[in-house]
Image (cartoon, helix red, strand yellow):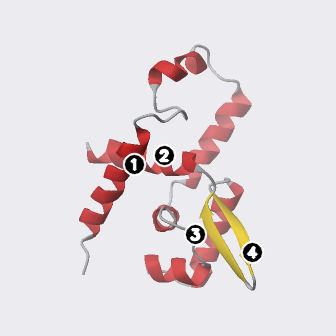
C-alpha cells in the first residue's frame, strides 16, 4: 500500500524540478513588470473566479489525479474515492475555469489538465502549504 504523504512529496519534488526554469510566473524577476500597476476590476474578478475553482477538496483531488496523465470519469472516481456523478459535477466547474480539457476517445471522454500552468499552480500551492 502506498503512503499518500510520500506520493504528495514525490509530486512536489517533480514540480520543483520543473519550476526551476518556469516561464509562467514562478520567476519573480521575469514577471515583476506585470505587477507594477493594479490590474483592472474585470481581470481581478477573473483571477478571483479561478481561485474559487480551487476552493473544493474534490476538485483538488481530481486535479492531482490528472497530474500524471488523462483519465475518464470512471477512473477519476476510482482514483479519488468519489461517485461518477460527483466527479462529473466537479469536472463541469473545472472545465468552466479552463483547468481541465476533455478529449473524446471513442465512447469515452478523457480529461487532462488543460496546460502546464495548472500543474505549476498545484505544485506551487503544495510547496507553499508544506513550508
Dot 2 or dot 4: first in sequence order is 4
Dot 3 or dot 1: first in sequence order is 1
What residue did someone put label 4 on?
104
- Do tag 4 and tag 3 residues touch (Cβ < 8 Å)? no
What residue did someone put label 1 on?
15
Q: Give the alpha-carbon distance from disc 1 to disc 4, as whole Å.
A: 28 Å
Q: Give the alpha-carbon distance from disc 3 to disc 1, as whole Å.
A: 18 Å
Q: Give the alpha-carbon distance from disc 2 to disc 1, as whole Å.
A: 7 Å
What residue did someone put label 3 on?
70
Q: Is residue 40 left or right of residue 19?
A: right
Give the percent coordinates (x, y) of residue 11: 36, 57
The disc placed on residue 120 is: 2
Dot 4 crowding, Cα within 10 Å, few <14, some 14–19, many 20+: few
Name the residue nearer the viewer: 14 or 130. Answer: 14
Element assignment for label 4: strand
Q: Give the alpha-carbon distance from disc 2 to disc 4, as whole Å.
A: 25 Å
Above/below status of 10 relative to 82: above
Give the percent coordinates (x, y) of residue 43: 69, 32
Element assignment for label 2: helix
Element assignment for label 3: loop
Above/below status of 5 relative to 42: below
Dot 2 or dot 3: first in sequence order is 3
Dot 4 or dot 3: first in sequence order is 3
Dot 1 crowding, Cα within 10 Å, few <14, some 14–19, many 20+: some
Residue at 26% x, 76% y: name it.
Answer: 2
> Residue 112's quadrant in the figure?
bottom right
Give the percent coordinates (x, y) of residue 94: 63, 60
- Do tag 2 and tag 3 residues touch (Cβ < 8 Å)? no
Residue at 50% x, 60% y: name it.
Answer: 56
Q: Give the alpha-carbon distance from disc 4 to disc 3, as whole Å.
A: 11 Å
Element assignment for label 1: helix
Amino acid at each position: 500500500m502506498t503512503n499518500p504523504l510520500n506520493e504528495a512529496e514525490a509530486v512536489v519534488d517533480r514540480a520543483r524540478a520543473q519550476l526551476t526554469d518556469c516561464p509562467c510566473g514562478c520567476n519573480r524577476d521575469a514577471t515583476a513588470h506585470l505587477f507594477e500597476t493594479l490590474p483592472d476590476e474585470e481581470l481581478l474578478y477573473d483571477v478571483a473566479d479561478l481561485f474559487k475553482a480551487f476552493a473544493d477538496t474534490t476538485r483538488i483531488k481530481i486535479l492531482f489525479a490528472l497530474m500524471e496523465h488523462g483519465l475518464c470519469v470512471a477512473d477519476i472516481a476510482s482514483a479519488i474515492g468519489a461517485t461518477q456523478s460527483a466527479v462529473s459535477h466537479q469536472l463541469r466547474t473545472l472545465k468552466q475555469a479552463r483547468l481541465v480539457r476533455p478529449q473524446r476517445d471513442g465512447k469515452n471522454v478523457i480529461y487532462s489538465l488543460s496546460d502546464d500552468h495548472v500543474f505549476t499552480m498545484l505544485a506551487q500551492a503544495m510547496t507553499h502549504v508544506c513550508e
